Amino acid sequence: QVQLVESGGGLVQPGGSLRLSCAASGDIFSINTMGWYQKAPGKERELVAAVTSGGSTNYADSVKGRFTISRDNAKNTVHLQMNSLKPEDTAVYYCKFGVRTSTIRYLEVWGQGTLVTVSP
């Protein structure tokens, strides 16, 4: 089994910053893509940012220039640095990893979600 644990959410004022982290543990041989998704009230869950094992990144248009995704392969961890936060960034943020286990199974694993609230 593989588990993801997220941290770093909270309440922040508009224009502020937060840093989310997501760490994986368990039966991990390798991790392919690491990504962050957001689920806002009344909306579908959608991709915010992702980083491949080779370091290539992609971002939703709404966060380009404000959010930065990075990964620490030695710690099986991904971070999302969120700057210049806006009220519309308010959502539950989920990480998702594509994991290859020691038995070469491929799993898509989700974190439990962490709430980010941007409000005066």
Image (cartoon, rainbow, N blue to C red):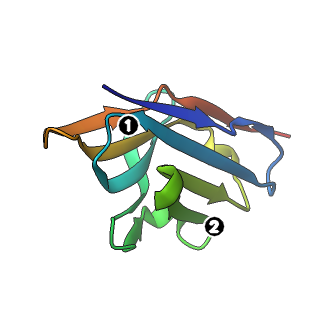
Q: Is residue 1 above or below residue 13?
A: above
Total numbered labels placed on residues in the image = 2
Q: Which residue is mark 1?
A: 45
Label 1 sits on a secondary structure element that is loop
Answer left or right for 21 relative to 29.
right
Task: Residue 19: give x, y in percent of width and height.
Answer: 69, 51
Picture quarter with the N terminus: top left
Answer left or right for 17 relative to 29.
right
The image quarter containing residue 106 is top left
Answer left or right for 84 relative to 99.
right
Answer left or right for 13 relative to 46.
right
Q: Earlier in the sequence, mark 2 or mark 1?
A: 1
Q: Nearer the viewer, residue 14 or 76?
A: 76
Q: Which residue is mark 2?
A: 66
Q: Residue at x 65, y 59 (%)?
A: 81
In the picture, the disc for residue 15 is none
Q: Is residue 56 above or below residue 114?
A: below
Tell me the amino acid under the disc marked 2.
Answer: Arg
Label 2 sits on a secondary structure element that is loop
Task: Residue 101: give x, y in percent of width and height.
Answer: 23, 40
Tell me the amino acid under the disc marked 1.
Answer: Arg
Picture quarter with the C terminus: top right
Q: CA distance from mark 2 to mark 1?
A: 19 Å
